[in-house]
Amino acid sequence: MLQMEELTEYEKIKTENKALLAQIAVQQKEAEELKKYKFFFDTGYNLATIASFEGYFEVINAQFEQVLGYSQKELLSNKFFSFVHPDDLADTIKEIETLKSGVTTFTFTNRYRKKNGDYLWLEWISSIPDVATGKIYAIARDITARKKHEAELSHKSEELAVANKELEQFAYVASHDLQEPLRTISNYINLLQEEYNNPLNENLAHYFKFIIQATAKMQNLIKDLLDFSRIGNMVAFAPVNCNNLLQEVMAELELVIKEANASIHVADLPVLIGNEIGFKQLFQNLISNAIKFRKKNVAPEVYISVEESNIEFCFAFKDNGIGIDEQFKDRIFIIFQRLHTADEYPGTGIGLANCNKIVALHHGKIWVASKPGYGSTFFFTISKKIEPTIV
Amino acid sequence: MKKINCILLIDDNPADNEFHAIKIRKAGVCNHIQTVNGGQKALDYLIQSGEPGQAEAFPKPDLIYLDINMPGMNGFEFLEVYKKLNEQLKSEILIIMLTTSLNPDDRERALATEEVNELQNKPLTVEMLLETIEKYF
């Protein structure tokens, strides 16, 4: 009997032990898992925390101490608002209110004071509230370096804008003031020629010719420079009906078109927000270039079309002219850069520089696709984000 | 050929005044050419021309060529004061603004001014002068 009882007891303990061992194994496994999560929580570049709606950090990872320089105790025993930069406090309180309403937020930024008194920028890349327990599960990263770069960049671009404006102003003043003495020279040279040119003195006729040509060329360059510098002032944006505008431009170029026996094929063009004077110059330049740089004995054909995307319009001016060598595709958009002598193709070399500037003013790009001997297609984009100017 | 008595040139640039005077002489459209190098001097001249016995030294102009961009008193500022001169002084004076400005605003403003007959671009030519005299006198 006794033996039986003992045996039963033994079996019972054995079973219990087995169950306990299994339980321990489960707990051990859970502990292992937890260790993994803890490792995940603690390591890495990001700051991770579980905070309360009341404004305390309850759990923080090691990065917090590392980045801010406080001890864990200091961080947990003070309300986190007390570390926030005074200028960011109102926004931070608002942010916590948003979280309390159960809304998950992303990319909230504020400044935290470090132990040494410096401030650093934190970007809270995800803050997930749990309204039931009143907790916030949040991850942040230190973006102080990025903010510094951004500030430097914005400072630099402001400087650049100022320098650009000054340069434009300089070009304007220089060209404007250069015009007058040059006009005087030109006037009196013409007078000299009128009064002193001697048909018997061939040299004199030559000299006059060169001086008058050079003055005229300089007058043209200065006038073009002045026009170029004025493009920066095209700040009035309003709806532009490209169809009507193109008809206007073609009417003005009628003589050129007729003389070259050119045909211009125009697709339906949009109404867009832009600077009308700028657009007119743009159309004028591209069409007259397409006609000017035509092949000998081939009537110029120009195809104008436009493609529209969500963000921009992309115009194309395709011709059957002489084309442009690959190596010059960028150079042609620079002021006073010419690929041909003035005898071959007249002009100062400002047209495409003007186009480039006008397109840039509309947050667009201009470029050319071309094969020498097969013609060129000039593309330019115009952003749809341009707002009409409020007068 | 028609010939008027006096043309007054108002321009701050003496080289321009001289050049235009030469062209006027060549066109042979007037007896006297007077030049002044600014708006205020032009007003002084006009007032003098109204004084008795000054017809010789300050002949009253039939035609004024007025520059726009001048330091001190510019063309439009000159016109503001000119408007207030007495009618007798202003009677039968024709004013043409003569400028290098291609600014449409200047043109509009010039033509909107009652005292201004026309706006022409520099430089004056013999043809322009003959045409103007033919048209207005």
Image (spheres, rainbow, N blue to C red):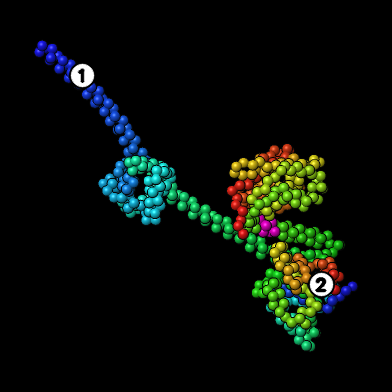
A157 left or right of A124? right
Residue drawn 60% across and 52% down? A387
User: Against B105, is B3 above or below?
Assistant: below
Give the x, y percent position of residue A232.
62, 56
> Where residue A102 sits in the image (x, y, percent)?
39, 43
Q: Say if residue A321 shows up in the picture.
A: no
Image location of residue B109, percent across then percent down: 71, 67
Report the magenta stretch's main SS.
helix
Residue A299 to residue B113: above or below: above
- Which residue sits at x=66%, y=72%? B71
Residue A2 placement: quadrant: top left
| Mark 1 neighbour density, 10 Å: few (under 14) some (14–19) many (20 or more) | few
Q: Which residue lies furthest to the bottom in this view?
A: B53
Please report, as a chain letter, where disc 1 is located: A
Q: Mark 2 points at which residue?
A: B24
Image position, residue B122 (x, y; %): 75, 66
The answer to whether residue A223 is magenta is yes
| Residue at the image position 67 percent from the left and 48 percent from the top | A271
Q: Residue furthest left?
A: A2
Near-viewer residue (B74 or A343):
B74
Q: How many labels does the image show?
A: 2
For disc 2, the chain is B
Give the alpha-carbon distance from disc 2 to disc 1, as whole Å.
130 Å
Q: Which amino acid does label 1 sit on?
A: Thr
In magenta, the rendered stretch is A222-228
Amino acid on which the number 2 mark rests in the picture? Ile
Q: Mark 1 points at which residue?
A: A15
